[in-house]
């Protein structure tokens, strides 16, 4: 009777080791991509970005002492061309008249070929503009209905694309209803019972009870809001970390959010304006920004199953780029040229009118 010796553990280990080594030689090692590194901001960087975004908003006075204010006052440190780019990217807004206005002015003779040539002769800061009078005239009469500016992305925009519901409009309407009650000066039928709190704290106290967003489709909205920080400053900090906004796009993103609630942002900016005239400060606008950021976080979490968070990670880097697409740049450049030509025509007619009112001996001193 032959008794076979049992396998020795060392031989099994050696065999397994040799198999692993063989597999390593035969199969290339593939490293999975690591998660995107979180963006870390210093307190100074964050405070500067919030302050800069808030000061981009022009103050809006209440009706009792309404004052007409340049709506682009917050962009006074920029050139007209750069301000037009900013408003196109962040609000989808134009700082020029409809193209049909300039076409009508050309057709009537108010804008002449000489005015168009004078506009073209000035230095161009936006690339893609028409290069001669014929091309600029053709641009003025071209159809503009299909040419729109794509705004910088928000989470609400991404959620709309993933769910086919306009969450940007829903958020604006929701914040507006809350703000109307909170900032009420005696006109509202229903006054906020939390007006003694700061704006963000008042919004949060109401939002944890509000079922409307969940009825509309925002999953666990009240639960999400309840988990948010209690102070506006902490919310802004945590929200920006959660959204992982690129540092280079922070200013643009925060300004973009405030522009989605432009009317109430202007009203809150008025409070800051008035406070600073008295040597004080006011946080209503930055707290309104916190409210809008809270909505971004809520939508990001509520629609994670629809892929909003993944889509946001792929789109948010557009916030870092100051340049527009080539087609949008060409449209903006052409419209800025038409506006400049319109201003040249106004200057020409004004100078001619002034010349008519001066004695003949003095007219030679006027520019032609």
Image (cartoon, grey):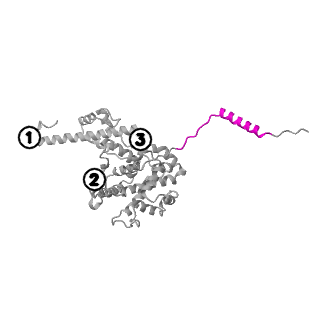
Residue picked out by circle 2: 69
The mark nearer the N terminus, 3 or 2, is 2
The mark nearer the N terminus, 1 or 3, is 3
Tell me the CA gap for discs 3 and 2. Answer: 30 Å
What range of the chain is rendered magenta?
A: 7-35
The nearer-to-camera label among 2 and 1 is: 2
Mark 2 Cα shell of 10 Å, populated few (<14), some (14-19), many (≥20): few
Please tell me which residue lies in front, 352 or 240.
240
Quadrant in the rendering for residue 107: top left
The mark nearer the N terminus, 2 or 1, is 2
Tell me the CA gap for discs 2 and 1. Answer: 38 Å
Label of residue 359 in the image? 1
- Secondary structure found at label 1: loop
Residue picked out by circle 3: 321
Spot occupied by residue 244 in the image (x, y as percentages of width and height): 47, 47
Please tell me which residue lies in front, 121 or 314.
314
């Amino acid at each position: 009777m032959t008794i076979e010796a049992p396998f020795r553990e060392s031989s099994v280990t050696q065999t397994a080791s040799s198999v692993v080594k063989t597999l390593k030689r035969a199969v290339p090692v593939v490293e999975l991509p690591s998660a995107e590194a979180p963006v870390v901001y210093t307190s100074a960087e964050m405070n500067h970005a919030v302050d800069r975004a808030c000061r981009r908003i022009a103050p809006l006075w209440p009706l009792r002492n309404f004052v007409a204010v340049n709506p682009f006052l917050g962009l006074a440190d920029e050139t007209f061309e750069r301000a037009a780019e900013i408003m196109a990217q962040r609000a989808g807004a134009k700082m020029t008249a409809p193209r049909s206005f300039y076409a009508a002015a050309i057709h009537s003779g108010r804008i002449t070929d000489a005015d168009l040539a004078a506009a073209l002769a000035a230095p161009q800061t936006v690339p893609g503009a028409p290069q001669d009078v014929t091309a600029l005239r053709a641009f003025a009469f071209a159809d503009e209905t299909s040419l729109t500016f794509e705004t910088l992305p928000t989470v609400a925009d991404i959620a709309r694309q993933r769910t086919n519901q306009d969450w940007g409009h829903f958020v604006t309407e929701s914040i507006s209803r809350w703000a109307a009650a909170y900032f009420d000066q005696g006109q509202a039928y229903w006054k906020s019972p939390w007006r003694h709190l700061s704006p963000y704290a008042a919004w949060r106290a109401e939002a944890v009870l509000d079922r409307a967003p969940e009825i509309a489709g925002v999953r666990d909205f009240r639960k999400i809001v309840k988990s948010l920080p209690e102070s506006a400053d902490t919310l802004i900090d945590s929200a920006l970390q959660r959204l992982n906004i690129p540092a280079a796009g922070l200013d643009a993103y925060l300004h973009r959010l405030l522009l989605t609630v432009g009317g109430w942002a202007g009203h809150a900016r008025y409070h800051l304006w008035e406070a600073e005239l008295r040597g004080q400060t006011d946080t209503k606008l930055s707290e309104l920004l916190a409210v809008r950021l809270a909505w971004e976080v809520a939508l990001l979490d509520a629609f994670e199953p629809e892929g909003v968070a993944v889509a946001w990670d792929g789109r948010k880097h557009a916030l870092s780029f100051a340049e527009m697409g080539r087609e949008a740049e060409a449209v903006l450049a052409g419209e800025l040229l038409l506006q400049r030509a319109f201003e040249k025509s106004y200057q020409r007619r004004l100078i001619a009118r002034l010349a008519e009112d001066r004695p003949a001996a003095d007219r030679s001193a006027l520019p032609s």
